[in-house]
Image (cartoon, grey):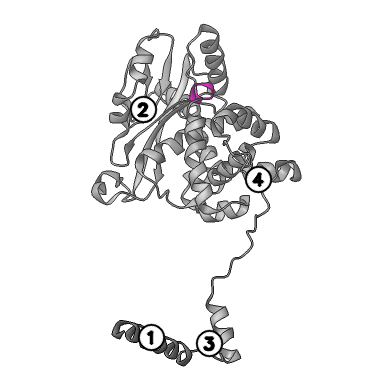
C-alpha cells in the first residue's frame, strides 16, 4: 500500500513541474539601423572579376607594331609559330593568354626595358601572369638560337662575308669584326666587386662578332664587367673556330685590347710610314661595323641601354636576355 502511495505522489509532483515550466517565446533583440549598416559594411565584398583588354596585333598600324615590338607583323607571327607548342597553355577558357599576347608582351619588355607591372598593364595582363609567362617565352626562344645566330662556316658563306667587308675599305679576307660591350645591371650583394667595371659601373661584359651588314654571328655573355676583353676571347670557342680555318685566308678584326693572332688583326701602334697608316685607316673603317652593331642593338632593345635602366635579375637570366636580344636583332635586320 505504501508503494502505491509513493508512486501516486511522484506522478503528481511531475505534473506540477511541467505546468510550472511552460514554453516561453524567445526574446528578439532590437538592433538599431546604424549598427546593422556597420555590420554589413564589415562583411567581405565580392567584386566582379574584370578582364583587361588584351593587346591585339591586328588592331595596330605597322608603325605602331614596329615602335612597340621592334619587329613587323610577319616577324611577330613567325615567332609565334616557332614557339607556339612550347608556350601554349592547357587551359580551354576563353580568358586564357594566347601565345600571340605572350610574345608581344615579351617583345615590348625587350624594346622598352620597363618594369614588369608597366609592361603587363600595357599588354592587358597582371604582373604575376607576365612574370610567369616571361620565363616560359625566354626558354622557348633560346632553344632556337642556332636559327638566328650563326658563324659563317661553309665556303659560300665565307666568300659572301669577305666580299661584303672588302667593299667597305678594301680590307681582304675579313670574316668578322669583334669587340666587347658592357650591359649594366644591378649586382648581387655577394659578388658585387666582380661586376664593377673600369668605369665604376656594375655590368656584364658581352663579346660579339658581326658581319658587314650588322648581323650578329657570335655572342658570348658569360662574364662580369671586371673581366678583360682578351680574357673573354681566350675563354670562348672563337679561337678554336678560327684556328680550324686557314690563317692566311680568314681574319677577325679587333681593337687594341686584343692580342695579335694569326687569325686576329689589330691596329698598329704609332704608325709612321704610309703603308702602316693606310692599314690602320682601312682597319678602323672596317672594324667600325661592330661599333655600329652595338649601337643599333642597344637603341633597338632599350632593356640593354642605360636609358632603359639596369636589369634587376640574376646574372644568369640577364645573360639569357642579352643573347635573346641578339637573336631578335638579327631577325629584325633581316626583315
Which numbered circle lies on residue 26?
3
Residue that protrudes farthest toward the front in the picture? 1
Cα gap from disc 4 to disc 2, whole angstroms: 45 Å
In the rendered image of this protein, does residue 270 appear above or below residue 162?
A: below
Q: Quadrant of the N terminus?
A: bottom left
What is the crowding at mark 3: few (fewer than 14 residues within 10 Å), some, or many (at least 20)?
A: few
In the rendered image of this protein, does residue 179 appear above or below residue 245?
A: below
Region rendered in magenta: 144-149
Of 161 and 31, the residue lying toward us? 31
Q: Is residue 118 left or right of residue 59?
A: left
Is residue 175 visible in this depiction of the protein? yes
Of 140 and 317, the residue lying toward us? 140
Task: Name the mark nearer the viewer: 2 or 1.
Answer: 1
Cα gap from disc 3 to disc 1, whole angstroms: 35 Å
What is the crowding at mark 4: few (fewer than 14 residues within 10 Å), some, or many (at least 20)?
A: some
| Secondary element type, mark 3 | loop
| Secondary element type, mark 2 | loop
Q: Residue at label 4?
A: 67
Task: State yes or no: discs 3 and 4 in contact (Cβ < 8 Å).
Answer: no
Q: Residue at label 1?
A: 8
What residue is at 70 percent from the left and 35 percent from the top?
Answer: 73
What is the crowding at mark 1: few (fewer than 14 residues within 10 Å), some, or many (at least 20)?
A: few
Which numbered circle lies on residue 111?
none
Cα gap from disc 2 to disc 1, whole angstroms: 137 Å
Which numbered circle lies on residue 271?
2
Reply yes or no: does residue 148 show up in magenta: yes
Cα gap from disc 3 to disc 2, whole angstroms: 110 Å
Task: Name the mark nearer the viewer: 3 or 2.
Answer: 3
Of 267 and 234, the residue lying toward us? 234
Amino acid at each position: 500500500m505504501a508503494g502505491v502511495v509513493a508512486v501516486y505522489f511522484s506522478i503528481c509532483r511531475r505534473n506540477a513541474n511541467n505546468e510550472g515550466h511552460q514554453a516561453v517565446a524567445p526574446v528578439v533583440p532590437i538592433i538599431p539601423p546604424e549598427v546593422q549598416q556597420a555590420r554589413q559594411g564589415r562583411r567581405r565584398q565580392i567584386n566582379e572579376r574584370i578582364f583587361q583588354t588584351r593587346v591585339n596585333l591586328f588592331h595596330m598600324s605597322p608603325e605602331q607594331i614596329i615602335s612597340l615590338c621592334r619587329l613587323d607583323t610577319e616577324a611577330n607571327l613567325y615567332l609565334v609559330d616557332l614557339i607556339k607548342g612550347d608556350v601554349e597553355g592547357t587551359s580551354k577558357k576563353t580568358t586564357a593568354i594566347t601565345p600571340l599576347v605572350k610574345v608581344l608582351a615579351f617583345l615590348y619588355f625587350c624594346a622598352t626595358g620597363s618594369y614588369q607591372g608597366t609592361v603587363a598593364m600595357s599588354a592587358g595582363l597582371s604582373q604575376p601572369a607576365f612574370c610567369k609567362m616571361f620565363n616560359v617565352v625566354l626558354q622557348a626562344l633560346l632553344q632556337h638560337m642556332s636559327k638566328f645566330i650563326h658563324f659563317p662556316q661553309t665556303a659560300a658563306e665565307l666568300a659572301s662575308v669577305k666580299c661584303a667587308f672588302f667593299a667597305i675599305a678594301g680590307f681582304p679576307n675579313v670574316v668578322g669584326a669583334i669587340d666587347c660591350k658592357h650591359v649594366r645591371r644591378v649586382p648581387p650583394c655577394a659578388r658585387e666587386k666582380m661586376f664593377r667595371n673600369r668605369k665604376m659601373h656594375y655590368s656584364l661584359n658581352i663579346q660579339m662578332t658581326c658581319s658587314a651588314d650588322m648581323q650578329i654571328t657570335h655572342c658570348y655573355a658569360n662574364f662580369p664587367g671586371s673581366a678583360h676583353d682578351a680574357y673573354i676571347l681566350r675563354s670562348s670557342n672563337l679561337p678554336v673556330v678560327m684556328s680550324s680555318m686557314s690563317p692566311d685566308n680568314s681574319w677577325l678584326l679587333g681593337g687594341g685590347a686584343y692580342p695579335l693572332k694569326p687569325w686576329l688583326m689589330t691596329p698598329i701602334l704609332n704608325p709612321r710610314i704610309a703603308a702602316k697608316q693606310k692599314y690602320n685607316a682601312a682597319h678602323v673603317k672596317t672594324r667600325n661595323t661592330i661599333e655600329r652593331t652595338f649601337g643599333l642593338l642597344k637603341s633597338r632593345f632599350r632593356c640593354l641601354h642605360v636609358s632603359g635602366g639596369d636589369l634587376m635579375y640574376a646574372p644568369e637570366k640577364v645573360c639569357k636576355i642579352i643573347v635573346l636580344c641578339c637573336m631578335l636583332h638579327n631577325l629584325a635586320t633581316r626583315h
